Image: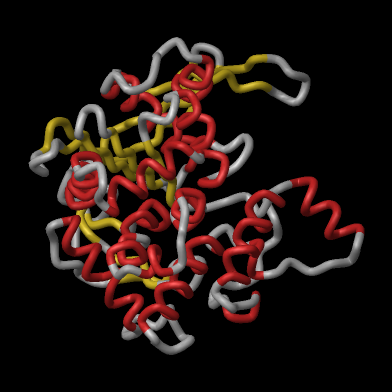
Amino acid sequence: MTHPAHGAVTLTEIWRGPFLESAHQGHAVVCDATGQIVESWGEPGTVVLPRSSSKMIQALPLIQSGAAAAHSLTPEHFALACASHQGAQVHTDKVGTWLDAIGCADDDFKCGPQESRDIDVRDAMIRAHESPCRIHNNCSGKHTGFLTLAKHLGAGPDYVDPDHPVQKACLEAFERVTGETSPGFGIDGCSAPNFACTLHGMARAMAHFAAADDDSAEAHLHRAMAHHPDLVAGEGRACTRLMRAMNGKVAIKTGAEAFFVAILPDQKMGVALKITDGSTRAAECAIAQILVRLGALDPNHPEALAYTNGPIRNWDGLVTGYMRAAPALL
């Protein structure tokens, strides 16, 4: 297996005054509706773990099995199934209502408890001496989707087991839309298998979503993400901020260790990128610049500038430098 740093190119730069202080390397691929590469940086064949960027793929069986229709799921449910949310009240309230509707409880989740990323919720729980629950886990929406599918299939409770019908359905969907046989999986932060593919395969999958028919499961999912950016991530997060800036026309999704994908229905294109050192800020900068490059994001929009040419301030509020997209992406 090729080392992920092999053939990587600089995608994001950190400048302090007149000095290039840090540089982040990575790989990125843009595919069209046929799955062919339109543009690439680095090595498209690099094998990657897309982490939470693959959540919309893991949600496909939820719709294609008939489970979503059987449980009258809405676009908000689909957005939560694709989410890495903040654990804010808007997220936990909606996930909790969904969980109740399928007759499940917090203990049925196989993801671990996680402290809320929402500062107000976190601080209120600390003051009340309350421990985080599984519903606060950023993946609880995806796991509610898994539980819904498991109920629909009449399958057992251990829905994160790679041999469970839910995960077999996820693998089938993953290999179908990436156009590849997965070489294996790693266990994600939420205990579910995360299947590997090439970066080209992931970009091909996103292009498949972008070009899908309006009434397809893929279209229902990417529209739900783009129209409910607050549910997909949360206030202050790059996914939410950038999707809002694109007015519901593009769906994007981050994944742990500096992964990012984008689904561009108007252009019928898909994007996947990986920063090799795992720097999230570098991935946010790179995806924003690629979206600008593809004409999906206004280069002068304040949210675009915040990521593609964002000022770095010190503790006294002085601008000491900038995070910028590297020349290769300009």
The percent coordinates of residue 120 (x first, y second) are 80, 46
Q: Is residue 248 left or right of residue 136?
A: left
68 and 169: which one is in front?
A: 68
Identified at 64% across, 70% down, the residue is 134
> Can residue 5 be seen by looking at this rendering?
yes
Question: Quarter-wise, where is residue 133 in the image?
Answer: bottom right
Q: How is the image coloured?
A: secondary structure
Does 145 appear above or below 157?
Answer: above
Identified at 83% across, 59% down, the residue is 125
> Can residue 20 be seen by looking at this rendering?
no
Farthest residue toward the bottom?
A: 156
The percent coordinates of residue 159 (x first, y second) are 43, 80
Identified at 62% across, 17% down, the residue is 320
Identified at 60% across, 72% down, the residue is 112
Does 304 appear above or below 126?
Answer: above
* Quadrant housing the C terminus: top left
The percent coordinates of residue 238 (x first, y second) are 52, 35
Tell me how many marks there are: 0
250 and 4: which one is in front?
A: 250
Question: Quarter-wise, where is residue 321 in the image?
Answer: top right
* Quadrant housing the N terminus: bottom left
The percent coordinates of residue 136 (x first, y second) are 66, 61
Q: Is residue 15 left or right of residue 277?
A: right
265 and 216: which one is in front?
A: 216
Does 190 appear above or below 78?
Answer: below
Does 298 appear above or below 80?
Answer: above
